Image: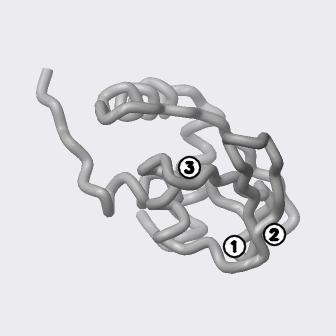
Protein backbone atom coordinates (compact mmCIF):
# COMPACT_ATOMS: atom_id res chain seq x y z
CA UNK A 1 0.00 0.00 0.00
CA UNK A 2 1.54 3.37 -0.99
CA UNK A 3 2.12 5.82 1.81
CA UNK A 4 1.43 9.51 1.31
CA UNK A 5 3.06 11.86 3.77
CA UNK A 6 0.99 14.99 4.11
CA UNK A 7 2.74 18.34 4.02
CA UNK A 8 2.14 20.77 6.86
CA UNK A 9 -0.09 22.81 4.56
CA UNK A 10 -2.13 19.69 3.64
CA UNK A 11 -2.52 18.73 7.31
CA UNK A 12 -3.83 22.19 8.19
CA UNK A 13 -6.19 22.15 5.19
CA UNK A 14 -7.50 18.69 6.13
CA UNK A 15 -8.03 19.70 9.75
CA UNK A 16 -9.83 22.91 8.79
CA UNK A 17 -12.05 21.08 6.30
CA UNK A 18 -13.23 18.66 8.99
CA UNK A 19 -13.31 20.90 12.07
CA UNK A 20 -14.71 24.33 11.41
CA UNK A 21 -17.00 26.70 13.20
CA UNK A 22 -16.78 30.18 14.66
CA UNK A 23 -13.69 31.93 13.31
CA UNK A 24 -13.35 34.71 15.90
CA UNK A 25 -13.12 32.54 19.02
CA UNK A 26 -11.87 29.14 20.13
CA UNK A 27 -11.25 27.24 23.31
CA UNK A 28 -8.04 25.94 24.85
CA UNK A 29 -6.79 24.56 28.15
CA UNK A 30 -3.70 23.97 30.22
CA UNK A 31 -2.69 20.28 30.27
CA UNK A 32 -0.84 20.93 33.54
CA UNK A 33 -3.75 22.45 35.48
CA UNK A 34 -6.78 21.33 33.48
CA UNK A 35 -7.99 24.94 33.44
CA UNK A 36 -9.81 25.83 30.23
CA UNK A 37 -10.69 29.19 28.74
CA UNK A 38 -12.02 30.98 25.70
CA UNK A 39 -9.64 32.76 23.33
CA UNK A 40 -11.37 35.71 21.66
CA UNK A 41 -9.27 36.19 18.56
CA UNK A 42 -9.25 34.95 14.98
CA UNK A 43 -8.54 31.27 14.41
CA UNK A 44 -5.51 31.33 12.11
CA UNK A 45 -3.42 28.75 10.29
CA UNK A 46 -0.87 29.30 13.09
CA UNK A 47 -3.54 28.41 15.68
CA UNK A 48 -4.18 25.13 13.90
CA UNK A 49 -0.47 24.48 13.33
CA UNK A 50 0.25 24.96 17.05
CA UNK A 51 -2.50 22.46 17.85
CA UNK A 52 -1.30 19.89 15.32
CA UNK A 53 2.30 20.04 16.56
CA UNK A 54 1.03 19.56 20.11
CA UNK A 55 2.07 22.89 21.61
CA UNK A 56 -1.44 24.30 22.28
CA UNK A 57 -4.74 22.47 22.70
CA UNK A 58 -7.50 23.81 20.44
CA UNK A 59 -11.25 23.48 20.70
CA UNK A 60 -13.55 24.84 18.06
CA UNK A 61 -17.05 26.22 18.53
CA UNK A 62 -19.05 24.15 16.02
CA UNK A 63 -21.46 26.88 14.88
CA UNK A 64 -21.69 27.72 11.19
CA UNK A 65 -24.50 30.12 10.34
CA UNK A 66 -27.63 28.66 11.88
CA UNK A 67 -26.27 25.11 11.92
CA UNK A 68 -24.19 23.16 14.38
CA UNK A 69 -21.41 21.07 12.88
CA UNK A 70 -19.72 18.55 15.17
CA UNK A 71 -16.95 16.08 14.54
CA UNK A 72 -14.40 14.60 16.90
CA UNK A 73 -11.24 12.68 16.14
CA UNK A 74 -7.84 12.67 17.78
CA UNK A 75 -4.78 11.30 16.03
CA UNK A 76 -1.48 11.60 17.86
CA UNK A 77 1.95 10.69 16.63
CA UNK A 78 3.89 11.35 13.47
CA UNK A 79 2.22 8.72 11.29
CA UNK A 80 -0.50 10.31 9.13
CA UNK A 81 -1.79 6.93 7.94
CA UNK A 82 -4.41 6.43 10.69
CA UNK A 83 -6.00 9.82 9.93
CA UNK A 84 -5.91 9.24 6.18
CA UNK A 85 -7.37 5.75 6.63
CA UNK A 86 -10.12 7.12 8.92
CA UNK A 87 -11.18 9.76 6.38
CA UNK A 88 -11.00 7.21 3.57
CA UNK A 89 -13.32 4.83 5.40
CA UNK A 90 -15.62 7.47 6.86
CA UNK A 91 -16.28 9.20 3.54
CA UNK A 92 -18.19 6.11 2.39
CA UNK A 93 -20.83 6.69 5.06
CA UNK A 94 -23.72 8.80 3.80
CA UNK A 95 -23.72 11.41 6.57
CA UNK A 96 -19.95 11.95 6.42
CA UNK A 97 -20.09 12.20 2.61
CA UNK A 98 -22.86 14.81 2.92
CA UNK A 99 -20.77 16.85 5.38
CA UNK A 100 -17.73 16.76 3.10
CA UNK A 101 -19.89 17.82 0.14
CA UNK A 102 -21.50 20.67 2.11
CA UNK A 103 -18.06 21.85 3.26
CA UNK A 104 -16.69 21.81 -0.28
CA UNK A 105 -19.67 23.76 -1.65
CA UNK A 106 -19.63 26.28 1.19
CA UNK A 107 -15.96 26.98 0.43
CA UNK A 108 -16.54 27.04 -3.36
CA UNK A 109 -14.54 23.84 -3.86
CA UNK A 110 -15.77 21.27 -6.33
Seen from the viewer's position, the closer of residues 20 and 98 is: 20
Query: Regarding mark 1 in the picture, which secondary structure is present there?
Result: loop
* Helix, strand or loop at mark 3: helix
Mark 3 or mark 1: whose residue is earlier in sequence: 3
Which residue position is annotated with label 1? 23
The residue pinned by badge 2 equals 65
Residue 55 placement (x, y as % from top left) = 50, 53
Label 1 near label 3: C-beta < 8 Å? no
Residue furthest out toward the left: 2
> What is the distance, in whole Å, between disc 1 and disc 2 at their CAs?
11 Å
Label 3 to label 1: alpha-carbon separation:
14 Å
Q: Nearer the viewer, mark 1 or mark 2?
A: 1
Query: Residue at label 3?
Result: 18
N-terminal label among 3 and 2: 3
Does residue 50 sit above or below 75 in this rendering? Answer: below
Residue 33 locus on image (x, y percent): 77, 42
Q: Of label 1 and label 2, which has the lower sequence position?
A: 1
Q: Nearer the viewer, mark 3 or mark 1?
A: 1
Amino acid sequence: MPTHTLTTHEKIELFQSLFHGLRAVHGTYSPETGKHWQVKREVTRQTIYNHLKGSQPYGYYPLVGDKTSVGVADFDGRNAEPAIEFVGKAKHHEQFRRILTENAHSKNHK
